[in-house]
Every structure is written in structure tokens, then in C-alpha cells.
Image (cartoon, grey):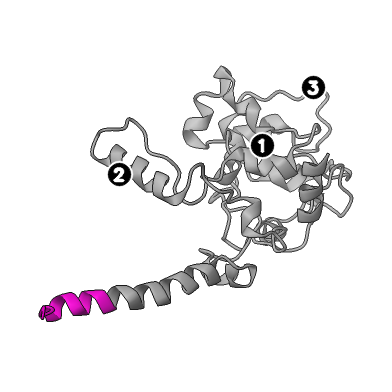
Amino acid sequence: MFKINPLRKRQFFGSIIGLIVGIPLIYILTLDATEEYISIGPMNTGHNDLKCFACHTDAKGNLLQQIQSNFSHTIGVRENGVDFGTKDVTVDNCLQCHDRPNDRHPVYRFSEPRFKDAIKNIDATTCITCHTEHQEERVSVESINYCMNCHQTLVVENDPIDISHKDLIAKEQWFTCIQCHDFHGNHKYAVPVKLADTIPMKIIQDYFDGGSDPYGKLKKYTALSLEDWLKSFDK
């Protein structure tokens, strides 16, 4: 009669236990009810109702193929690795819901050669530079003086404001830009002509952190909801 090595016996039972525990656990983690437990952080303002699959789409190939491809890349047999589990989130994911014709600063514009120096300081070719997800806020960019990267030579004809744009730029008062203008130009509101009537910085920062909208509730465009986004695939 064969004598089974105790080590082999432990390995066998360990594998069985691993399968019994692992398979149900993997299944449970794929359920909608467990999304909050596997998320790296809370959703940003306005994205509270989104599901993971809205941004994190399945990567090409099955799990084994993805492991093989990335292992081959690691040992130098394959030139490039592949997405594992889900695809990387890109600006294309954002634009599926947020693309609009009236955007004053569309991301594609910053791919033009004239902005090559500006994007070295702030990469405006991608949404996540300013809107990093899972931060529970609206705008995540560290400093709001970003207008300085493109508007140093701005000239406004018949400047309507009481302290001219020329003077504000000369004094490097770049934070005043966002006190008058929302970056994407999506709000319907009257731009103030007196600096004293602009939106205070404290309120702007609260808005960036997820607070109420100081530019008003009237918008030229409303982003797609999860339901509308799903319906767009049926067209």
C-alpha cells in the first residue's frame, strides 16, 4: 500500500480549501452589491449612481490569455503587455457621456502643436488631470491658476470688466479667471463686469470639492445618466 507524504496531503487539502473559498469569493466580488468594497475610493460628485462597468470595461481575451501575454512581455518574448481584467480608463470613456459641441476647452484641442509647451505643465489632453475619479470631489487639480499656461498673451478687445484682463494678467491674478468663467463654458449665466461681483474663491473651492454649483443650475448640456448611456447602445 502506498504511503502518502504528509506534505503532499497538506498541499492537496490546501488546494481544495482554496478552491472552495476562492471560487465563491470571486463570484461574490463580481456582484453589484459588493462594488463599494472593491472600489479604490468613493465616486466623484455627479458620478454617485454610476456602476463600475460604465468605466471599467472588460479587457480583450480571457484571464488565461491575459496572464500568458503579460508573462511573455515580462520575460521579453512579447513587445507589449495587455490590459488585465479590465481596460484602462481613458478620455474616450469620459466623452461617451460628456462630449458636447459647446465645450470651450475640448480635450482634442490641446493635441494641437501650439499647446505642446502648455501640456508639459498641465496635461489637458485627458479629463483625469483635473477630474481624478474616486476622490469624492468634482475637481481634483491642485491649483486653479491653470489658465496661465495658455493665456499669458491674452488680449480682450473692448474689455468690459472694471479691472482689465491686461492688468489682471500683469499682476498674475490667474485665480480670478475661474471666478468669472467656468472652464468648460457649459453654464447659462451672466458674466460679471465688476471684479467685486465675481464668485468668491472660498465658494469656488467648495464647488470643486463637491459643493453646490455657484454658476447656477441652467446648463447648455447635461451629461448622460447611466440609464441614457446604456440606451445609447441600442440605437
* Label 2: few (<14), some (14–19) or many (≥20) C-alpha neighbours in 10 Å: some
Q: Earlier in the sequence, mark 2 or mark 1?
A: 2
Q: Earlier in the sequence, mark 2 or mark 3?
A: 2
Residue 111, position as x, y percentages in the image: 58, 24
Is residue 4 a member of the stretch shown in magenta? yes
Taking the spot 73% from the left edge, 48% from the top edge, the residue there is 179
Identify which amino acid the numbered label 3 is placed on: Glu
Residue assigned mark 1:
168
> Dot 2: what SS?
helix
Residue assigned mark 3:
157
Which quadrant of the figure has residue 110?
A: top right
Which quarter shows the C terminus? top right
Taking the spot 35% from the left edge, 74% from the top edge, the residue there is 18
Q: CA distance from mark 2 to mark 3?
A: 60 Å
Which quarter shows the N terminus? bottom left
> For the residues carrying marks 2 and 3, which lies nearer the camera in this image?
2
Taking the spot 51% from the left edge, 50% from the top edge, the residue there is 86
Q: Earlier in the sequence, mark 1 or mark 3?
A: 3
> Dot 1: what SS?
helix
Residue assigned mark 2:
71
Whether residue 171 is visible, yes or no, is no
Which quadrant of the figure has residue 3?
A: bottom left
Q: Are marks 1 and 3 in contact (CB under 8 Å)?
A: no
Identify which amino acid the numbered label 1 is placed on: Leu
Q: Are marks 2 and 3 in contact (CB under 8 Å)?
A: no
Residue bounds of the magenta highlight: 1-13
> Is residue 30 or residue 226 the one in the foreground?
30
Query: Where 73 sits versus 205, above or below?
Result: above
Give left or right: position of 138 versus 134: right
Query: Where 132 sits versus 221, above or below?
Result: below
